[in-house]
Amino acid sequence: MSGGAGVPVKERVYAAAETISAERPPTVSSVREAAGVSNADATRYLREWREEKAAAGSRIAATPQSVLEQAARLAGSVWADAVALAAEQHAAVEARWVRDSQDKDTELGELVADLDRITTEHTTETAGLRAELAQAAERVTAAESRASLAEEAAAEIRAEISTLTSDLAAARARAETLQHAHDALLQRITPEDTTKEQPREPDSQ
């Protein structure tokens, strides 16, 4: 083992422990080799080094009351600011929610009004269309009735024309027959010598 000339054993152990603790927890063997001391010295002074480190940590952990009070005041101030900010944000969110709710209520009211208006217009238009359809159906029925009557009248006229045609043909036939009979009678009652010249009587002088 090699140690620093003229450097006390305790300081060498402390220096070795500080150097080793920067990388890993120091042990008796690692300190002994690094400091070049005996196993007994390494054990003794490493224990003292650890006790001093622990005591220093305790002193650091023991925060003065004034610091604690200042920290409490600071924490209270921060907490108050946080509460005020949260309240402000909550108020803003609530106001926005109320505004959005009012806008939605207004929009919903407008939609309901539009729906009522459209429903009324649809009902009115449907009623008008039904009335027009009923009138059209009545006109169709009347037209069909008139067409049926016209067809019946046309059939009657055709039948009457046929009857008149038959009667006319019969009348013509009878007229021809009568004409023939008339001509025959005329020939019978006309003297045959009406066309011959009567003889002249002699003059008596």
Image (tube, grey):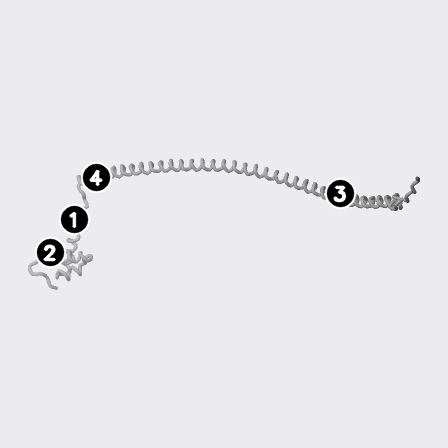
Q: Hey, what amino acid is under mark 4? A: Leu
**Residue nearest the observer in this picture, 205 or 138:** 205
- Classify mark 4: helix, strand or loop: helix
Q: Which residues are magenta?
A: 53-60
Residue 139 has which mark?
Answer: none
Residue 74 has which mark?
Answer: 4
User: Mark 1, residues whose alpha carbon is within 10 Å: few (<14), some, or many (≥20)?
Assistant: few
- Classify mark 3: helix, strand or loop: helix
- Residue 48: image location, x then y, percent: 15, 53
- Residue 20: image location, x then y, percent: 17, 58
136 horizontally vs 104: left or right: right
Residue mark closest to the camera, 3 vs 1: 3
Residue mark closest to the camera, 4 vs 3: 3
Asked if the residue under mark 2 is in contact with the one under mark 4, i.e. CB atoms within 8 Å, the reply is no
Q: Hey, what amino acid is under mark 2? A: Glu
Residue that numbered label 1 is attached to: 56
Residue that numbered label 2 is attached to: 11
User: Mark 2, residues whose alpha carbon is within 10 Å: few (<14), some, or many (≥20)?
Assistant: some
- Residue 61: image location, x then y, percent: 19, 46
Q: Hey, what amino acid is under mark 3? A: Leu
State the separation of the CA atoms marked 1 and 4.
27 Å
Residue 41 among magenta residues: no
